[in-house]
Amino acid sequence: MLPKALNHMTSPNMRYDDFMRMAKQLGCVGVHYRNDLGRPLFESDSPEQVRRLATDLGMQITGLAQLERFNEWNSERAEQATSLIQTAAAIGAAGIGLIPVNDGSGAADGERQANLKTALAELKPLLKAAGIKGFIEPLGFAQCSLRHKAEAVEAIEAIEGQGTFMLVHDTFHHFIANGCATGAPIFPEYTGIIEISGVIDPSLGPLDMQDEHRILVDVRDRIGNVDQIRELQEAGYTGPFSFEPFSPEVHGLDNPAEAIAQSFDFIASELAA
């Protein structure tokens, strides 16, 4: 069984410290925090307080998300990146999340690859100086400027960014980008974390699936979470897998710990089988 983790999007209304304690209770190795939850990061506690809590609980901070539109590099993006990297380093996070432009712009063939390489080349020295990783997350949506892992790997290699940049394997985005759970390139040696969520609505095709459809994983899952995790595991991936459901249904759970534990147990039993 791979190590477990939780993305703060699993219970976004929960304070960061309560969230970390819940993850600890659930047997997780770490948590992935976010700056897009609509309130001050860490409830305005200092980075030192966040780092101390993680140390006291023996928990990793698997990442801090997110630098949005990272592949649209400009002076504003450079300032945002510098600030996020500084915060991530201060809390002891493994790296920062890099989210590509997802509004249809910058997606033309040739343009998107050039923009990606420029952004990675600019980010590389900032990340190396801080001693943290850049976690690139291709988004499977049709309008996204970075849909497929292969283009990310090509850009990493082009700027000699191996070891500085890693991929996020998001099971939802991998499925909708490729129209299948397994069979598409997975690049286990470049994968830094697996983000998981399930989709159960039988009426949705891959291109119809959106963030609000993403729930905890159970037997009804249509996007092959267990198959994707198993494929990466068998290919040599040993890092954490982390829940990242966006559905309001999950966010409104009265007892999220119980539901998360049940989903973790389901995945574990399926992997063991």
Image (cartoon, rainbow, N blue to C red):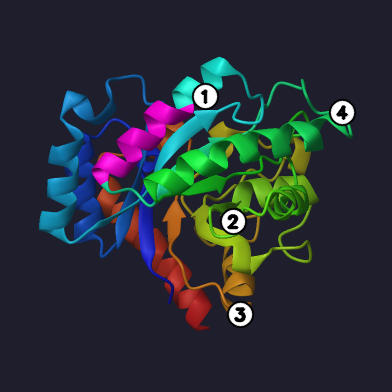
Frontmost residue, 252 versus 88: 88
User: In front: mark 2 or mark 3?
Assistant: 3
Residue bearing mark 1 = 78
User: In front: mark 4 or mark 1?
Assistant: 1
Q: CA distance from mark 4 to mark 1?
A: 23 Å
Q: Quadrant of residue 122?
A: top right
Q: Secondary structure at mark 4?
A: loop
Q: Quadrant of residue 96?
A: top left
Residue bearing mark 3 = 234
Q: CA distance from mark 4 to mark 2?
A: 33 Å
Examine the rendering and report whether any part of residue 2 can be seen: yes
Q: Which percent across, then down, holds residue 54?
A: 18, 52
**Residue stretch rendered in magenta on the structure:** 81-91
Tag 1 or tag 2, which sits nearer the N-term?
1
Q: CA distance from mark 2 to mark 3?
A: 21 Å
Residue bearing mark 4 = 108
Query: In the drawing, does residue 268 fall left or right of residue 20?
Result: right
Type of amino acid at the residue the image marks with label 1: Ala
Residue bearing mark 2 = 221
Mark 1 closeness class: few <14, some 14–19, many ≥20 residues within 10 Å: some
Q: CA distance from mark 1 to mark 3?
A: 38 Å
Examine the rendering and report whether any part of residue 205 can be seen: no
Type of amino acid at the residue the image marks with label 2: Asp
Q: Which percent across, then down, holds residue 31?
A: 32, 50
* Residue at the farthest right position: 109
Tag 2 or tag 4, which sits nearer the N-term?
4
